[in-house]
Image (spheres, grey):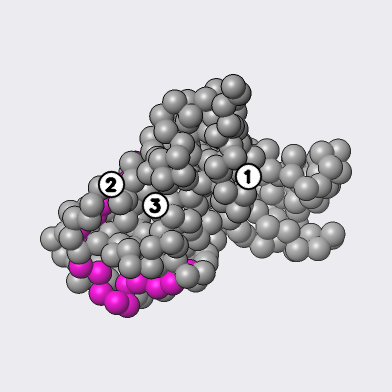
């Protein structure tokens, strides 16, 4: 007799299930193993499964996004959940980009909840959150943008946290409120690093790469450039990623998005060369950086220092 397929018990209106939910549907360990073998479901992480069409594309960022959204989906079914999404999970819910992605889910609550209810791969932070540090995003309770950045800065490396803080300020995070929050957290673990992150953050960075480059300049002791420096050219306003105007020197980051984004590559290359030609005719010099250059800070410092020492050409109108 042919066994009844386990897929018959999978609700058509659901994409994600925990182990307990599959057990409740009558899909035990052997049936789950069969579904995993046939590819009808995939394991996102221990204790969490998804229909194959809902599985993330390869890549840690996709996996982290999908894992968090699956957990949020489970939480929506439990309105009495006594936790708040915080730290990197709250940042991810807002669409912030990370230098290094992780599928760990962060929640904050006043007491240690049942680990089984939270699921595997969840890190709990026991803390009392004032009500004005919590808000709803599409019905999901999470920490405010300002509290999220402070929490991330307390547990993340400086470079990773500055990248998030730049984006947060660009989204409208209140700098004065950030500073007031930090004043009230004296003595908290990681607050010294958080203060430094807030001091270094700049909303003018338009990408993860630009945030990394700006921080590299600072840590290598280079004179601070002006991000997004505006220049009037014969073909209109153009912006330089970083500029030392008194030296007529610009540092530009060449990333894949610039040349392989929505604009066809040939067109993007033509427009970039046209832009650079007009800027060079005005006297601007360029140091071009790539993602791999950011892994060699000493070499970047040498190139920019050498360019800054050279005589600046007279600006031309």
Q: Quadrant of residue 206?
A: bottom right
Residue 67 image position (x, y, % from top left): 47, 45
**Residue pointed to by mark 3:** 88
Circle 2 residues within 10 Å: few <14, some 14–19, many ≥20 = few
Label 3 to label 1: alpha-carbon separation: 29 Å
Q: Given contact means CB atoms under 8 Å apart, are the residues at marks 3 and 1 in contact?
A: no
Q: Earlier in the sequence, mark 2 or mark 1?
A: 2
Residue 295 image position (x, y, % from top left): 47, 30
Badge 3 element = helix
Badge 2 element = helix
Q: Earlier in the sequence, mark 3 or mark 2?
A: 3
How many numbered discs sit on the rendered protein? 3
Q: Nearer the viewer, mark 3 or mark 2?
A: 2
Front in this rendered view, residue 88 or 7: 7
Residue 43 is at least partly visible in this image = yes
Q: Given contact means CB atoms under 8 Å apart, are the residues at marks 2 and 1 in contact?
A: no
Quadrant where the C terminus is found in the figure: bottom right
Q: Nearer the viewer, mark 2 or mark 1?
A: 2
**Residue pointed to by mark 1:** 252
Front in this rendered view, residue 316 or 102: 102
Badge 1 element = strand
**Residue pointed to by mark 2:** 116
The magenta segment = 121-137
Q: Residue 32 colored magenta?
A: no
Residue at x 78% of width, y 48% of height: 262
Q: Earlier in the sequence, mark 3 or mark 1?
A: 3
Front in this rendered view, residue 53 or 149: 53
């Amino acid at each position: 007799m042919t066994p009844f397929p386990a897929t018959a018990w999978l609700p058509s209106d659901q994409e994600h299930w925990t182990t307990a939910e599959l057990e409740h549907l009558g899909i035990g360990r052997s049936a789950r193993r069969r579904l995993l073998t046939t590819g009808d479901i995939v394991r996102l992480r221990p204790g969490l499964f998804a229909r194959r069409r809902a599985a993330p594309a390869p890549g840690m960022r996709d996996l982290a996004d999908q894992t968090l959204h699956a957990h949020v989906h489970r939480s929506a079914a439990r309105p009495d959940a006594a936790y708040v999404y915080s730290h990197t999970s709250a940042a991810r819910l807002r669409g912030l980009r990370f230098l290094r992605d992780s599928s760990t889910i962060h929640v904050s609550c006043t007491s240690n909840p049942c680990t089984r209810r939270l699921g595997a791969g969840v890190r709990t932070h026991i803390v009392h959150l004032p009500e004005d540090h919590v808000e709803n995003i599409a019905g999901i309770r999470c920490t405010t943008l300002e509290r999220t950045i402070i929490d991330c800065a307390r547990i993340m490396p400086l470079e990773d946290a500055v990248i998030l803080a730049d984006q947060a300020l660009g989204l409208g995070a209140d700098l004065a409120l950030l500073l007031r929050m930090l004043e009230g957290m004296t003595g908290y673990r990681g607050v010294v690093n958080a203060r430094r992150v807030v001091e270094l953050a700049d909303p003018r960075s338009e990408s993860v790469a630009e945030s990394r480059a700006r921080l590299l300049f600072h840590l290598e002791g280079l004179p601070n450039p002006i991000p997004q420096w505006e220049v009037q050219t014969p073909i209109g306003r153009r912006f330089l990623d970083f500029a030392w105007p008194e030296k007529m020197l610009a540092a530009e980051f060449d990333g894949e998005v610039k040349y392989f984004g929505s604009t066809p590559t040939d067109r993007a290359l033509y427009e970039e060369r046209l832009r650079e030609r007009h800027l060079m005719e005005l006297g601007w010099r360029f140091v071009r950086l790539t993602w791999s250059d950011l892994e060699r800070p000493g070499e970047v410092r040498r190139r920019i220092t050498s360019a800054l020492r050279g005589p600046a050409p007279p600006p031309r109108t």
